[in-house]
């Protein structure tokens, strides 16, 4: 027989950081007053020290924080959410609504951790939450006195008026009072990742049914993944024992796990909680890889999110024991009966010395034997059914049990927990019983959540007074207790059958073997949801929702379960109402005179259990937030000190600061002037590049561009504009004809992907008869724009002397291959974005760095200057070239001043719709130049354009500024804008209104081509 | 007159640091190699000419071009399925110009070619934990039954297109996977691959294709 | 969600992008005279804008851009997300359709 072991010496005393030797010795002596002398799945050779609220205690490997606290006689572990009532540990599993603690400290601090799932490790530090200054003396427990006002709908009723109080007064007040723990305010130093796994059969839950299912499916030869949120397989077998195939249940678990581990086609994943079921057999699970150790090892992650793709799944997630609602049911020391058995049997920790049992079903009676075998006393059994179940009659007589026919109507006690239980029998007589623990069983709810994630509605079963899964997601079956099969024998058979069937459906043909055998114990229940008596009786422990809140909601008209949930916040806490939802709706059913199935359940949604955002992000945080793309000259530019800017996924050189330059404008101005007066170059490899090949390539391009390309001569380039089918501009770029059946198309940087998808759509869907092949050549080429009056001089240095680089030999819009000195062949395009003589030169990407270096060498005597995207932008604005801010998904070709390009001789994408009345209206906003009258004034993008003298507003608004820059050539800020009838208004003074920056000034509308409007320079 | 040098660069010139990384210990879990100096050509059959293109491939490489997601290795090249009626030819770079010219000639009229020798970077993942590392960034099922030697897939990693195929097991008996990634993404994806492998211990290197 | 590409097999939906209803056909519009054919504007208006809001199976365009770059036509139940079939668009690969424009 076991007994308490308060004086049992600890094997070792590991050091806790920051604790004094005296604290450690104190811990050793005070520790584990409620630990049984033997038994339990704990390793007594491995004592572990931990601290809770600064008090150092000890436990053993195999403990959870909750079981270690139980072993140390700790009952008070938390303060409740609303009323700050003292709370204890209610369950022994992941459904725990009450024992939430703040784990760890500093940057690793994590609030709302369930003590019942947190494995103990040496040096664990946990704090209670939601209390000040201490757990025992919590100032905010004064809220209990004000309880009448904290009823359901309190926020809605109280913080209504005056409206202006909301933002400044009410919200900060509520936010300060709300929430349980406090999260860390430093970046999370841990790493997380995500991984994929694939299988035929996914078994969710490793209890008796899950082990049977996994074994059947594994033996049959299918690929099996078995996930279990606990650190150990076995489920309730670890707590309730039993006999299977003639052996002790724990021995059966050991053998079964050994066999599963020996099968190459079975993968066992413990500490892995399934939290989501998604379409097409995709499941999500959270593996707590290193939450059971002080810190993850080097290069280890803390948690990992698994996305599991399974052809079939078998949910063997068991059932959750439900509380009964009665006054004082939240006192520390009131615990689920199954949890009492778990602490006693699995953890050898005694929740109380005198245990009272309140049960309405046969299963609860198991607790009597468990407590007695551990050496505890059963103070009384309270069973409203008025009769000892047949199976337990001998035991009741033998141990002279006090059995009451009735219910618990109050629980006496304080912060230290239960001191007595008040019983009101079925005749209305009241009696108080001494007890320091009350074990409660209101029956079992099959864990239907996962089977309902696709809006399946659970089905009510009267015989077990509980919901079982209804329409499960495709490919999913449920077995065992999760399916309402509560006897061990039935669990094993059901699991085996489901596992074998799932494997067979996946084509596995092996022998699944025979189901293991065990007894079919009786589960008789007579539903009891609530004992009506005076006092606070809790339904949702985590959100402090009482039975009277539920009935109040009903009286105020919130009868639907979805309204009940939102009005009272029942089931909306981190536990998602695992222990409270069904009870809450049962009370609502009674209040409305409907049945429970008529009342129905709320919609179940993932995640089943809380998941850290860090785990969902995995690798994708900080610099890895998204993938990045580097240009071929990236490292060359970085070595020259370039400042980079993220443009989409690309990192592009924005400018190249020189010593002594005081700001970016100075750097950019220098770069622009160097180009306009000499020569410069810029990496433009980010442009999308598409090889368009095939006999019908020209016809194809005629149909996707508004202008003609079949007529383009080989060796020539042409600017092209594409529309969407609705007539709005999609993209622009230069396309060259390399050969009769080969065009080289370029897109803007931003639209490279979408344009490629669009072209493939045209090729594969719209015009499958055309012989066209497309391939992305974006990354094949390092492409540089070389611009400025000295461009030709520079190129003459670089290209082979045999190449004719004269204006006649290489005219404007020419495109052809050239040999470079040193033996590399390049493609050269005479096109200009800057308005200067300019070429774009392409070499295979492997020469990207060498090309930049060689351009510097070739242009050394010309003062060649690398320039970045800012200078590129300045020069395009000076030339009135449109870019992203103008190609913004609202503009037509004519809006951009490119209407004349639209061919009238052919069909092309968007042609018909571009002719619609609204898209050709004379008062459309079109691209214009804008320059402030005050030449010192900085123009800003986004500022509104209204007529001079008009009051800014929706009625007077005529457009806005799209792109701005400081123009070194105009020596003032200039911009492009979209302005109503803009082209008719050159010279008009308008009002520029910028409420965002509180600016208001006048500007002149002008020709968007500020610089060299005749275009002489680029053709020279 | 200046001599212009045309040094070549790898997109992994900064990202790939040769040697051991991550978990220390006697065992290397994941071996990562950049395979340099390859010729890579995308072959896309012309409209209605898939059979002719396959014939041409047979003529030039002596092997059947893959018509389903597979990688087929011949004496001079590996042909990797890269979409319906198209495949990628990959070969060690010897005489690039004549390698390309031979292809242009044999596929004339039956397929369009797109030289992608600089458009992709080839990363090889092997070692006892290579598959576990890949499971962190690829949604493919790489189980032996689902993805045997010679299997190929066009897939996505970090929302970026990747061609992945499995070649014959390494000398250590463990699977060897090849990943063709876009050149501009190579630096980024290399980091993803390395980060996914660190916990197993990484050996990184680059080598010429052979 | 998983989508069974007819070429690549079943893949996760992140590899695909969605375009929408595959039923509307682009009006064929060959221009010789410079004049719009009769009714062409109405036909394009229908093609671009008019869609049925189907609760149940509908034919949709999906692009396997993160895979084999094929445009696919899928029959998907908009209520349950179940796919009944996924087939290739007429011009995928080098296929030569019998008739122009499907």
Image (cartoon, rainbow, N blue to C red):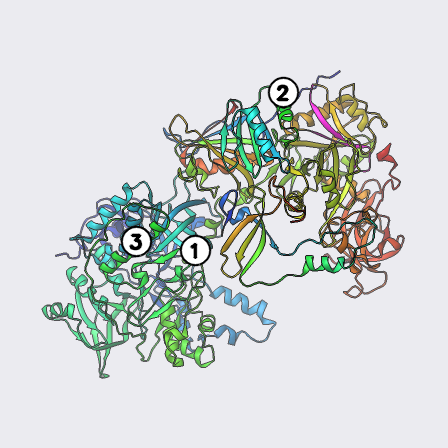
- Based on the picture, tell me whether residue A676 belongs to the magenta stretch: no
Residue B37 shows in the view: no
Secondary element type, mark 2? helix
Q: Is residue A295 left or right of residue A399?
A: right
**Residue beneath label 3, please?**
A210
Dot 2: few (<14), some (14–19), or many (≥20) neighbours within 10 Å? few
Dot 1: few (<14), some (14–19), or many (≥20) neighbours within 10 Å? some
**Residue beneath label 1, please?**
A276
**Residue beneath label 2, please?**
B98
Q: Earlier in the sequence, mark 1 or mark 3?
A: 3
Q: Are marks 1 and 3 in contact (CB under 8 Å)?
A: no
Residue C19's place in the image compared with A736, above or below, is below
Judged from this view, the residue extending furthest toward the front is C98
Q: CA distance from mark 1 to mark 2?
A: 55 Å
- Name the image quarter holding the C terminus of chain A: top right
- Image spot of residue A8 (x, y percent): 18, 51
Q: Is residue A963 left or right of residue A479?
A: right
Q: CA distance from mark 2 to mark 3?
A: 62 Å
- Name the image quarter holding the N terminus of chain A: bottom left
Say which of marks 1 and 2 sits in front: 2
The magenta region covers A823-842
Q: Chain of mark 1?
A: A
Q: CA distance from mark 1 to mark 3?
A: 18 Å
Secondary element type, mark 1? strand
- Image spot of residue B17 (x, y percent): 51, 28
Q: Chain of mark 3?
A: A
Q: Is residue A141 left or right of residue A162?
A: left
Judged from this view, the residue extending furthest toward the left is A398
């Amino acid at each position: 027989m076991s007994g308490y072991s308060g004086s049992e010496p600890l094997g070792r005393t590991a050091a806790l950081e920051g604790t004094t030797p005296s604290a450690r010795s104190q811990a050793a002596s005070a520790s584990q007053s409620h630990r049984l002398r033997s038994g339990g799945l704990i390793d007594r050779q491995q004592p572990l020290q931990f601290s809770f609220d600064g008090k150092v205690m000890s436990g053993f490997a195999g403990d959870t924080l909750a079981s270690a606290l139980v072993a140390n006689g700790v009952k008070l572990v938390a303060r409740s959410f609303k009323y700050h009532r003292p709370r204890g540990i209610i369950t022994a599993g992941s459904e725990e609504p009450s024992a939430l603690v703040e784990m760890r400290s500093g940057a690793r601090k994590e609030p709302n951790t369930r003590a019942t799932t947190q494995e103990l490790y040496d040096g664990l530090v946990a704090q209670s939450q939601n209390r000040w200054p201490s757990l025992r003396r919590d100032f905010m427990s004064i809220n209990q006195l004000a309880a009448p006002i904290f009823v359901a709908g309190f926020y809605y009723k109280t913080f209504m008026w005056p409206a202006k109080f909301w933002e400044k007064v009410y919200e900060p007040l509520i936010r300060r009072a709300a929430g349980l723990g406090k999260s860390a305010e430093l970046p999370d130093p841990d790493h997380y990742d995500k991984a994929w796994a694939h299988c035929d059969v996914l078994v969710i839950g490793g209890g008796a049914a899950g082990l049977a299912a996994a074994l059947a499916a594994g033996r049959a030869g299918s690929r099996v993944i078995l996930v279990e949120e606990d650190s150990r397989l076995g489920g309730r077998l670890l707590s309730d024992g039993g006999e299977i195939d003639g052996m002790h249940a724990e021995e059966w678990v050991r053998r079964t796990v050994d066999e599963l581990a020996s099968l190459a086609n079975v993968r066992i994943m413990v500490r892995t909680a399934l939290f989501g079921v998604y379409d097409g057999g995709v499941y999500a699970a959270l593996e707590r890889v290193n939450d059971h150790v002080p810190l993850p090892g080097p290069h280890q992650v803390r948690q990992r999110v698994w996305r599991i793709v399974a052809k079939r799944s078998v949910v063997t997630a068991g059932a959750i024991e439900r509380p009964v609602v009665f006054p004082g049911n939240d006192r520390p020391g009131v615990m689920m009966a199954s949890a009492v058995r778990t602490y006693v049997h699995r953890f050898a920790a005694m929740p109380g010395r005198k245990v009272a049992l309140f049960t309405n079903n046969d299963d609860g009676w198991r607790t009597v034997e468990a407590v007695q075998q551990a050496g505890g006393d059963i103070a009384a059994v309270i069973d409203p059914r008025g009769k000892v179940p047949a199976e337990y009659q001998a035991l009741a007589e033998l141990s002279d049990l006090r059995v009451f026919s009735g219910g618990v109507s109050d629980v006496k006690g304080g912060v230290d927990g239960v001191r007595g239980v008040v019983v009101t029998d079925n005749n209305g007589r009241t009696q108080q019983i001494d007890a320091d623990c009350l074990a409660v069983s209101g029956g079992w709810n099959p864990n239907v959540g996962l089977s309902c994630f696709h809006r399946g509605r659970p089905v009510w079963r009267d015989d077990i007074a509980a919901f079982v899964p209804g329409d499960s997601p495709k490919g999913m079956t449920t077995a065992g207790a999760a399916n309402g099969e509560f006897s061990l024998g039935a669990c094993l058979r059901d699991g085996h059958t489901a596992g074998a069937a799932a494997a067979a459906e996946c084509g596995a043909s092996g022998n699944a073997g025979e189901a293991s055998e065990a007894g079919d114990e009786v589960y008789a229940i007579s539903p009891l949801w609530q004992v009506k008596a005076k006092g606070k009786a809790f339904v949702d422990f985590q959100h402090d929702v009482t039975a009277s809140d539920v009935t109040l909601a009903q009286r105020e008209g919130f009868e639907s379960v979805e309204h009940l949930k939102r009005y009272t916040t029942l089931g909306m806490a981190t536990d998602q109402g695992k222990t409270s939802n069904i009870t809450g709706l049962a009370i609502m059913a009674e209040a409305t005179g409907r049945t429970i199935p008529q009342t129905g359940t709320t919609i179940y949604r993932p995640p089943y259990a809380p998941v850290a955002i860090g785990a969902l992000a995995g690798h994708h945080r900080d610099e890895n937030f998204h993938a990045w793309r580097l240009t071929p000259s990236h490292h060359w530019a970085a070595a020259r000190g370039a400042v980079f800017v993220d443009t989409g996924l690309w990192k592009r050189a924005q400018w190249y600061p020189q010593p002594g330059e005081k700001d970016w404008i100075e750097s950019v101005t220098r770069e622009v002037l160097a180009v306009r007066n000499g020569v410069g170059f810029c990496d433009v490899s980010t442009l999308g590049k598409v090889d368009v090949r095939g006999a019908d390539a020209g016809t194809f391009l005629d149909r996707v561009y508004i202008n003609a390309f079949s007529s383009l001569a080989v060796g020539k380039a042409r600017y092209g504009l594409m529309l969407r089918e609705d007539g709005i501009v999609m993209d622009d770029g230069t396309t060259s004809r390399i050969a009769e059946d080969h065009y080289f198309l370029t897109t803007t940087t931003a639209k490279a992907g979408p344009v490629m998808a669009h072209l493939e759509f045209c090729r594969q869907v719209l015009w499958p008869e055309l012989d066209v092949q497309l391939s992305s050549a974006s990354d094949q080429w390092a492409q540089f724009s070389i611009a400025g009056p000295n461009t030709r001089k520079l190129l003459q240095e670089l290209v082979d002397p045999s190449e004719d680089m004269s204006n006649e030999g290489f005219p404007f819009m020419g495109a052809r291959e050239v040999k470079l000195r040193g033996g590399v062949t390049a493609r050269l395009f005479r096109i200009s974005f800057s308005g200067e003589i300019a070429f774009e030169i392409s070499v295979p990407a492997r020469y990207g760095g060498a090309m930049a270096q060689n351009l510097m060498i070739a242009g050394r005597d010309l003062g060649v200057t690398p320039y970045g995207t800012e200078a590129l932008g300045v020069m395009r604005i000076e030339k009135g070239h449109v870019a992203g801010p103008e190609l913004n998904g609202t503009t037509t070709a004519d809006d951009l001043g490119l209407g004349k390009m639209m061919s009238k001789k052919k069909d092309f994408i968007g042609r018909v719709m571009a002719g619609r009345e609204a898209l050709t209206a004379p008062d459309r906003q079109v691209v214009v130049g804008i320059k402030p009258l005050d030449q010192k004034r900085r123009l800003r993008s986004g500022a509104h354009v209204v007529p001079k003298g008009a009051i800014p507003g929706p009625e007077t608004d005529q457009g806005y500024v799209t792109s701005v820059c400081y123009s070194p050539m105009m020596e003032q800020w200039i911009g492009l804008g979209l302005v109503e009838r803009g082209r008719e208004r050159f010279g008009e003074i308008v009002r520029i209104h910028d409420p965002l920056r509180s600016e208001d000034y006048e500007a002149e509308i002008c020709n968007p081509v500020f610089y060299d409007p005749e275009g002489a320079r680029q053709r020279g | 007159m200046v001599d212009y040098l045309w040094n070549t660069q790898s997109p992994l010139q900064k990202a790939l640091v040769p040697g051991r990384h991550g978990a220390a210990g006697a065992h290397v879990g994941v071996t990562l190699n950049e395979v340099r100096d390859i010729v890579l050509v995308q072959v896309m059959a012309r409209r209605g000419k898939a059979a002719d293109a396959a014939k041409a491939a047979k003529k030039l490489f002596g092997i059947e071009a893959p018509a389903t997601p597979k990688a087929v290795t011949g004496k001079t090249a590996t042909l990797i399925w890269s979409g319906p009626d198209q495949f990628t030819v990959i070969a060690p770079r010897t005489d690039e110009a004549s390698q390309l010219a031979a292809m242009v000639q044999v596929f004339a009229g039956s397929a369009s070619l797109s030289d992608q020798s600089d458009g992709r970077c080839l990363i090889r993942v092997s070692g006892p934990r290579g598959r576990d590392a890949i499971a962190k960034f690829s949604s493919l099922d790489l189980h032996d039954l689902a993805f045997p030697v010679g299997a190929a897939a066009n897939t996505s990693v970090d929302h970026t297109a990747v061609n992945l195929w499995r070649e014959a097991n390494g000398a250590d008996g463990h699977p060897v996977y090849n990943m063709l990634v876009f050149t501009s993404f190579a630096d980024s994806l290399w980091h993803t691959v390395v980060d996914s492998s660190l916990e197993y211990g990484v050996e990184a290197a680059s080598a010429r294709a052979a | 969600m998983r989508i069974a590409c007819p070429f690549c097999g079943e893949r996760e939906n992140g590899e695909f992008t969605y375009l929408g209803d595959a039923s509307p056909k682009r009006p064929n519009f060959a221009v010789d005279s410079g004049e719009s054919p009769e009714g062409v504007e109405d036909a394009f208006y229908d093609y671009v804008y008019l869609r049925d809001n189907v609760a149940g199976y509908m034919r949709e365009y999906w692009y396997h851009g993160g895979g084999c770059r094929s445009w696919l036509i899928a029959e998907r139940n908009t209520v349950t997300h179940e796919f009944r079939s996924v087939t290739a668009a007429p011009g995928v690969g080098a296929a030569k359709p019998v008739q122009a424009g499907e």
